[in-house]
Amino acid sequence: MNPLPLSSQLKQLLPRGRILDSPAQLAGYAADALGYKSYLPDAVVIPADADELVGFMKGARQLGVPVILRGAGTSLSGGPVAAQGGVVVHTSGLKRIREINVEGFWCEVECGVALNDLDAALKPHGVFYPPDPSSGPVCTLGGNVASNAGGAHCFRYGVTSNYVLGVEVVLLDGSVQRFGGPAGGRGPWREDWKRFMIGSEGTLGAFTRFWLRLLPLPEKVWTLRATYPDLRSIEAAIHALVAHSSYPAAIEMLDPRGVAMVETSQMAVGLPKGSFMLLLEIDGPPALVDARVGPVADLLRHAGSNDVVLSDQDAMRQKLWKARKAAGGLLGQLSPDYVVQDAVIPKSALADVLQLVYDEADAAGIRAVNVFHAGDGNLHPNFLFDSRVPGELEKVELISERLMRRVIEVGGTLSGEHGIGNDKSAYMPLVFGPDSMRLQWAVPAAFNPTHQLNPLKVFQNRRFAT
Amino acid sequence: MKTIAPMQAERLFTHFLDPVDGTLCLPASATATDIHAQTAGHRLRFPLVLDPGATLREHTAAATHAPASCRFGPYCDNILGINWRLPGGRLARIGERVVKTTTGYDWLRFLLHSGRRFGEPVDYVLRLRPDCGFNIEARFEGDSQALRGCVSRLLHSGWMHWWDAVDFITQDAGSFVRVSIHCPSEEAPIFEQQLNRIAAETAAKLSVRHDAQPPLDGLPDVTVKTTPDRAISLAGQLAREAERCVALCYNGVVHVHLGEGEDMAGRAHSLMQPHIGELHALGGDWHSRWLPATPPSLTESQWLETLERTIHAS
Ligand SMILES: Cc1cc2nc3c(=O)[nH]c(=O)nc-3n(C[C@H](O)[C@H](O)[C@H](O)COP(=O)(O)OP(=O)(O)OC[C@H]3O[C@@H](n4cnc5c(N)ncnc54)[C@H](O)[C@@H]3O)c2cc1C
């Protein structure tokens, strides 16, 4: 162990201006978007570029404290926080878009590039990068890759792991490894190591840059919004949509509690009281989507909606999205704290699992709002509570555990796009049996055997032993 | 938060068909014909087929992509879960039956094409797609410039999302571009209009067959992964030593069919030797079902040994 104090050691690795260690500075890094659990790091470093990040990682092992990578800190699972203390590495300096190759359908970006900045850079080339978490204006590609981010348009386009062709990563031994590249294969390696990197939540290495797959931009989008009087009829609509040949890009749902939240706010859009809202998009060449939009609207009506609104005009489409988008922001305003779960279930269990959320939350006196990616069966029950009120957090944890048990019973999984972090790590034994659990532990054992990188994440007892 | 007790047994997949979620669990020894028999009645299909008589295990051992990967992505995006037999004989559950997961490290994508080193697949959970009941196969013929123009137009617009496959095929008789489309029959005229437009713009000759079979090229002898913009010329070079090359244009994949002959392993190896440097520099790769995987480097061996220690301990 190095006898020097941490701050002196850090100054040997990085220029002075890149190191934050005053309590006021550190406070800004104590939590992620989950908010209610905070952990003050011992220091924060902000490398100016990839070389500085590599230089830091080469010396990181000697620091003898945990190292936590952090992009924009918008994680909803307690991912980029110093749960066991240590140094947070903020990647905001690595924000170059290095190449856009339209003919090859790929781009090369640094890990600190904000998702929407990439979108803006790609648009003039007629291509796009599909994963679209709602945190797009600020979240980084590093955070997206590390938590295998999804978004509203996953039903057709899929999640981040469907688009990562290559990853450059600095490991704790200081080596810089490239897994894959523009061609998206294994490169010179025998095995496809990038597969473990994607979704690894900062526990295997520090990503510096990525090669990402692109698609041509669809020329036209139709947005449709429908409301339903009950859970069974909206469920029928969702089931019919996922089997429909128009293959919607997005199938999103807001429940009556979410509708009420929007309608009693300044963001009200006039949704019927007590209704379930379904929002979907079909996109593609005009000739195709214009022919499809009629049958899709009919399908929505046939499932029981007498309130279908649709548009292909940008301004109106934004209005149709407004309730869905506003819901996310309102959650934070309505309650001092909230937990958002991220379970994925087979869609045949949708009504059943939502009912469990309502029953459990009502019985505990906890407000629950559901706004989620219905096409994927990716639930986001938001439990609103106040962590200052004794017992509230415990109630939410109990509901969450019962929810997770039910999710696993019906064949689902803990997380579809937010990752496990330290928020869902306790539930991992519900998913993995003895052998698959051993396989899971083998991965950090290969790349981060001391658990110095992001300890206490993914697995509750994955602790850095100094 | 309280600690949840570890599970005593693996939560293995049992065979099922979930028509609502569009998922199917069946043995890795099932063939595409077996899948079709189970799914057709539900108007669902598994589009990534190379050879209707080959098993799923043979498919994933031979290739990472199929022609319909143009629209639906590689096998690893369409196989959601696996019951995996570990070298010691026990079964472990890998992946999920739902369409999206970020729970734990992605062993599914790691193992799917890793050969037999870590064991073998016993059952697969497949993601199915709506079966619209109608297939179109279009063929563009013409000189090389016209064909490249066709591919560029097919891929560089929003239509690209709706072609099941865009393949550049090179064989003795010359080259052509094959497009396959799967759609409701009432949409066929809309697709054909676009194909005709492309043919007119590129001076390529277009022929269209309705109610065609999806393309079934058979299992490739060699699979190469490069970038989409290099796939056609690479296929052209490889075709000089092979019977047939199919470039899956958007995926940047070339399937090489060597044709009948002795020493498939030797032929595959010598065919690929001149290209390996460039492929690796691009983060691409190649493999042949006739050849064992290349030996790992020293660094890689250390990671593999750690994984193997755990896997063999199981
Ligand atoms: C309002 C809101 C809406 C959201 N909507 C969505 C949504 O629709 N879909 C969705 O999937 N998510 C959503 N999220 C969650 C979150 O935005 C995503 O998980 C996002 O990918 C996190 O990116 P980030 O840059 O903020 O990463 P951070 O929160 O900083 O970090 C996330 C994880 O990535 C690791 N990490 C970050 N950078 C690196 C690196 N360079 N190398 C290695 N590891 C790294 C961290 O250690 C951590 O484990 C939402 C969050 C908010 C607040």
Image (spheres, coloured by chain):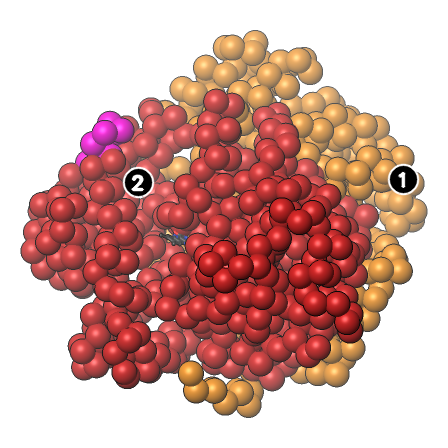
Chain colours: A red, B orange
The answer for which chain carries disc 1 is B
Q: x, y percentage for residue A423?
A: 44, 71
Circles 2 and 1, Cβ within 8 Å, touching? The answer is: no
What residue do we see at 40% from left, 19% from top? B193
Nearer to the camera, A121 or A96: A96
What residue do we see at 44% from left, 68% from top? A38
Amino acid type, label 1: Gln
What residue do we see at 70% from left, 58% from top? A10
Badge 2 marks a residue whose secondary structure is strand
Q: Residues within 10 Å of mark 2 (few under 14, many from 20)?
A: many
Residue A312 colored magenta?
yes
Q: In this rendering, would B309 be left or right of A296?
A: right
Q: In this rendering, would A106 be left or right of B192?
A: right
Q: Measure the C-alpha gap from mark 2 to mark 1.
A: 47 Å
Quarter of the image holding residue B226?
top right
Nearer to the camera, B160 or A104: A104
Say yes or no: labels 2 and 1 on the same chain: no
Amino acid type, label 2: Glu
Residue B37 colored magenta?
no
Kindly identify which residue carries mark 1.
B273
Examine the rendering and report whether any part of residue B33 can be seen: no
What is the number of the mark on residue B23?
none
Kindly identify which residue carries mark 2.
A281
Examine the rendering and report whether any part of residue A338 can be seen: yes
Which region shows up in magenta?
Answer: A310-317
Decide if ligand 1 comes within 8 Å of the CB at mark 1.
no
Q: In this rendering, would A355 be left or right of B311?
A: left
Q: x, y percentage for residue A234?
A: 20, 57
What residue do we see at 73% from left, 22% from top? B174
Quadrant containing the N terminus of chain B is bottom left
